[in-house]
Image (cartoon, helix red, strand yellow):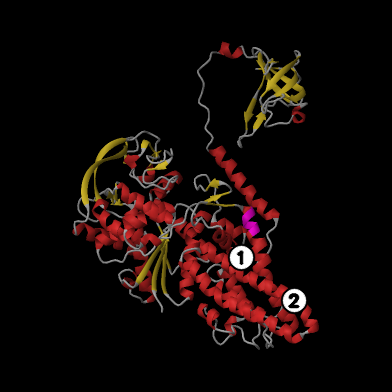
């Protein structure tokens, strides 16, 4: 029986493009789920949109010298196009700057305000005197009171995922000026979460929510057990939705009050466009509401938003909130500020028409129960060893052999042997197996079951060897190829949630659109024949579903990351402050000479030290230099160098060093010589 679902995916901040962490954590699993629901005949509203009122947007605007509207317009367009190009099948992708959202959020606030669901308080908030501004959320950085992470934001710690207020931070600093903020009184409206604590305890802890993921249930339980406190729903900012009641001048709705209401306003926008009633998707108890989020959003979707909905009184509550953990990149935490990420627009440019490769790699390695690591080598292996060698190989063999033996017409099968019937029975079981994985939000497991179906096809062909039986038993070959084509047809349908572009290609190869009726998810488990004898598949050489990715392509991506890492290190490298002043007489005491390194050897039992023989023009002397981690001995012999020759001798590991070689670092942090290697410069020449 068809059911109604409202599926939401966390609204991305429009202060930058989408990266693989966002995809793995939220958008790919949400898309798999929504596509599956549609394929199984359900009524689905898959909703998302750009979150355009977050403090990171205003910070980026200040840095770039543009308006926040300029920032959100730019990145909303980029994000929306990236999602479309990547095949994320939103029914509506909206934005929180839209009038319908401002109206919806304002109305929601006023309803709670009129029903006395808020507490109005004057409290002390962090204030930057120099910037003449209150420091909300990302405008302040300090030490997390829970885990001790020193770069926690004023609303949340990205290290442990804890949500808090800016005043909870230890040693807070303004993100605008770097100054230590003061405390200043201001008036705000608070949602008294403590008032809803018993409801949340009954609904989540004592109710049926133990089927939620352990990470979600555990975090929510911890919050409730610690005792809930009122949470401010307004902020002292000039960017956002103005507080729509008297006394709200100069204040806006807190982004985490405003943003989840974006799901509602986006549904309204969609329903108006397609001629549906939006309230069916938000106020009908027969509708199942599912939020796909990352673990850093758990408290907002499981405590704050449900409390808002409960306080309003007419909305359904989420049935499940399948939050994923974080995805790391090449062993390090993804960081947008450090540009340590694989950005979706760049991936789509570097790997055209390979959307499904990334979808599969992210799903097969999804951070469903713990943080996982994306590596380009694993991405390559998933493509070459699974998509190409298993899935693609099976389909290519089936299509090529059907073309070669039967001129692309599906043969009439002869007698079915036990292996044929067992194989067809196994195919019929896969829809239920994959459905069970998806419905339990185990998308990684579901993707591997899909691959197992392709493995089944490969094993069947390998065991039955139609390329051999075509010479000895043509009737047997017809049956084998007929069965193999049924497996291919099942793959075309069952792959759609995970590999939508591949599914479409495969349906084209098999000419599904020319069937009397295209196979559905249910057909695979109930029908004996998916592709009837006499049906023709695509003529000519079949299109390869996947192509091998070469080492060079992967190395290019690794080089790009390394370049990004070095550029970030250079950009964030702190310049040493000026030392204490010296007089001219102090400077003239330094005797700097041009010298040449004659000999070099590694000092035994050390990592850093080279023992050098240097011709200074005055004499040949021994100098011990800590450059062994940057240069091999043979690399420095013959180098002209700058030597401080009148430095007092000093013994290092028993060797007397009689001077110092001048060194510095380049923009990438690499050690380099202060090099006087100019034609005509001789040893002993004094540098002044």
Q: How crowded is mark 1: few (under 14 residues within 10 Å), some or many (20 or more)?
A: some
Q: Is mark 2 on a helix, strand or loop?
A: loop
Q: Give the residue pinned by disc 1.
A: 353
Residue 473 sits above or below residue 569 on the image: below
Residue 599, image x and y in percent?
A: 78, 23
Q: Nearer the viewer, residue 69 or 410?
A: 410
Which quarter of the picture shows residue 263? bottom left
Residue lying at 32% horizontally and 68% vertically, measured from the top left = 282
Label 1 residue SS = loop
The residue at the far right in this view is 471
Residue at 53% in and 55% down: 20
Rendered-image quadrant of the N terminus: bottom left
Q: Which of 214 and 183 is in front in this view?
A: 214
Q: In this view, does 432 lie above or below 661?
A: below
Residue drawn at x 24%, y 64% is 313
Return the disc, 2 or 1, that comes first in the chain's sequence: 1
Position in image of residue 489 (x %, y %): 60, 78
**Residue at 54% in and 71% down:** 496
Which stretch did the figure color magenta? 377-381
The alpha-carbon separation of the residues under discs 2 and 1 comes to 32 Å
Check contact, mark 2 vs mark 1: CB within 8 A.
no
Q: Is residue 378 magenta?
A: yes
Which circle marks residue 465 in the picture? 2
Vertical position of residue 196 compared to residue 267: above or below: above
């Amino acid at each position: 029986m068809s059911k109604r679902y409202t599926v939401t995916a966390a609204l991305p901040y429009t202060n930058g493009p989408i990266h693989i962490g966002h995809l793995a954590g939220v958008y790919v699993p949400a898309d798999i789920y929504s596509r599956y629901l549609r394929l199984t005949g359900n009524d689905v509203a898959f909703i998302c949109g750009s979150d355009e009122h977050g403090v990171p947007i205003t910070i980026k605007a200040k840095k770039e010298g543009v308006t926040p509207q300029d920032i959100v317009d730019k990145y909303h367009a980029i994000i929306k196009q990236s999602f479309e190009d990547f095949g994320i099948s939103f029914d509506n992708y909206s934005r929180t700057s839209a009038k319908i959202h401002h109206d919806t959020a304002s109305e929601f606030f006023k309803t709670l305000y009129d029903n006395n669901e808020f507490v109005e308080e004057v409290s002390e908030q962090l204030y930057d005197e120099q910037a003449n501004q209150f420091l909300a959320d990302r405008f302040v950085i300090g030490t997390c009171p829970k885990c001790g992470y020193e770069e926690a934001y004023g609303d949340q710690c990205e290290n442990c995922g804890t949500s808090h207020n800016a005043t909870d931070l230890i040693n807070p600093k303004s993100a605008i000026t770097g100054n230590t903020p003061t405390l200043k009184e201001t008036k705000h409206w608070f949602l008294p979460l403590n008032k809803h604590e018993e409801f949340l305890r009954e609904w989540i802890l004592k109710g049926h929510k133990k089927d939620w993921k352990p990470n979600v249930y555990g975090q929510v339980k911890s919050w409730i057990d610690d005792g809930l406190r009122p949470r401010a729903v307004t902020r002292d900012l000039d960017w956002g939705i103005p507080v729509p009641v008297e006394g709200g001048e100069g204040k806006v709705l807190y982004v985490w009050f405003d943003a989840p209401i974006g799901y509602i306003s986006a549904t309204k926008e969609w329903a108006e466009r397609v001629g549906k009633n939006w309230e069916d998707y938000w106020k009908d108890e027969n509708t199942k509401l599912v939020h796909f989020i990352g673990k850093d959003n758990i408290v907002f979707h499981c405590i704050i938003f449900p409390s808002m909905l409960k306080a309003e009184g007419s909305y359904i509550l989420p049935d499940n909130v399948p939050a994923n953990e974080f995805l790391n990149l090449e062993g390090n935490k993804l960081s947008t500020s450090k540009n340590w990420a694989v950005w979706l627009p760049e991936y789509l440019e570097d790997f055209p028409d390979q959307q499904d490769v990334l979808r599969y790699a992210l799903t097969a390695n999804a951070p469903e129960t713990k943080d996982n690591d994306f590596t380009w080598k694993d991405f390559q292996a998933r493509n070459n060893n699974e998509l190409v060698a298993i899935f693609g190989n099976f389909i290519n063999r089936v299509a090529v052999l059907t073309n070669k033996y039967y001129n692309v017409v599906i043969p009439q099968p002869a007698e079915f042997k036990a292996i044929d019937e067992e194989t067809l029975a196994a195919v019929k079981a896969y829809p239920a197996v994959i459905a069970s994985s998806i419905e339990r939000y185990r998308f990684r497991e579901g993707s591997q079951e899909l691959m197992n179906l392709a493995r089944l096809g490969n094993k069947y062909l390998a065991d039955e060897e139609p390329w051999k039986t075509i010479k000895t038993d043509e009737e047997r070959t017809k049956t084998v190829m007929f069965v193999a084509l049924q497996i291919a047809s099942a793959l075309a349908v069952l792959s759609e949630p995970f590999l939508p572009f591949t599914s479409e290609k495969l349906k084209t190869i098999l000419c599904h659109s020319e069937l009397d009726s295209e196979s559905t998810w249910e057909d695979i488990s109930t029908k004996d024949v998916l592709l009837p004898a006499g049906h023709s598949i695509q003529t000519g050489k079949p299109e390869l579903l996947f192509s091998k990715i070469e080492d060079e392509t992967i190395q290019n991506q690794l080089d790009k990351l390394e370049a990004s890492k070095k550029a970030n290190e250079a950009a964030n490298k702190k310049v040493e402050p000026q030392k204490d002043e010296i007089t001219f007489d102090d400077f003239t005491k330094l005797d700097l000479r041009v010298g040449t390194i004659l000999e070099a050897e590694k000092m035994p039992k050390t990592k850093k030290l080279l023992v050098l023989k240097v011709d200074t023009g005055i004499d040949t002397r021994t100098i011990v230099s800590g450059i062994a981690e940057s240069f091999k001995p043979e690399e420095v012999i013959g180098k002209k160098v700058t030597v401080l020759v009148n430095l007092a001798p000093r013994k290092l590991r028993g060797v007397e060093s009689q001077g110092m070689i001048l060194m510095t670092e380049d923009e990438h942090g690499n050690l380099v010589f202060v090099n006087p290697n100019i034609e005509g410069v001789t040893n002993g020449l004094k540098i002044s």
